[in-house]
Image: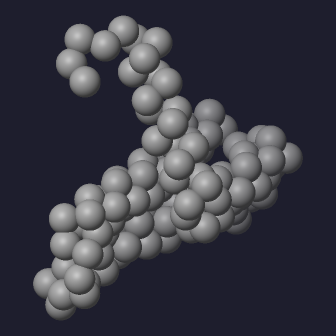
Amino acid sequence: MKNQTITQKLKNATRGIAFTYKTESNFRLHCLSAVIVIILLAVFQPDWIWWALIIICIALVIAAELINTALENLIDHLHPEIHPQIGKVKDILAGMVLVLSITAIIIALLAVLDTVGY
């Protein structure tokens, strides 16, 4: 994997995102939510700082979902049997995504409220 061209590295990254999109319903839901939020931003036209914060939140949620999927796949490969400790690790990973998702929702709501004058 070392010494690959930038083109090959981009292909690998795109393949990873595509795999996650195809196999993870939560990832698809997050992508759909991101599109809806961006449309709402276009409608409400908040200040640029809100745009920046929300785009960062969207990227963090998407990245967390990618990390979650990667680690779950690795865990399942290394330890396919059900094990309480592995269940805890998977729950913690899901918790990471949930915390970031809730934070993103709160920031999006604050942007809308600020834009409409509340």
> For the point 21% across and 18% down, which residue is it?
2
Q: Position of residue 37 (x, y in %)?
A: 71, 54
- Please state which of residues 69 and 51 is positioned toward the viewer in this rendering: 69
> Could you tell me which residue is drawn at 80 percent across and 47 percent down?
39
Dividing the picture into quadrants, the one containing residue 26 is bottom right
Q: Nearer the viewer, residue 17 or 111?
A: 17
Which of the 4 image quarters holds residue 25? bottom right
**Image spot of residue 116 (x, y percent):** 78, 57
Q: Of 89 and 30, which appears nearest the observer? A: 89
- The x and y percentages for residue 49 are 55, 37
Q: How many marks?
A: 0
- Looking at the figure, which quarter contains the C terminus? bottom right
Q: Is residue 31 visible?
A: yes
State the image coordinates of residue 98 (x, y, percent, origin top left): 43, 72
Residue name at image x 85 percent, y 47 percent: 43
In terms of image quadrants, where is residue 9? top left
Residue placed furthest toward the bottom: 84
Quadrant (top left/top right/bottom left/bottom right) for the N terminus: top left
Report whether 18 appears left or right of 1: right
Left or right of 51: which side holds 87?
Answer: left
Residue sitting farthest toward the right = 43
Q: Mark yes or no: residue 115 visible.
A: no
Q: What residue appears at the point 65 percent right and 64 percent down from the top-left corner? A: 29
For this orientation, the residue located farthest to the left is 85
* Residue 80 left/right relative to 117: left
Query: Which colour scheme appears in the figure?
Result: one colour
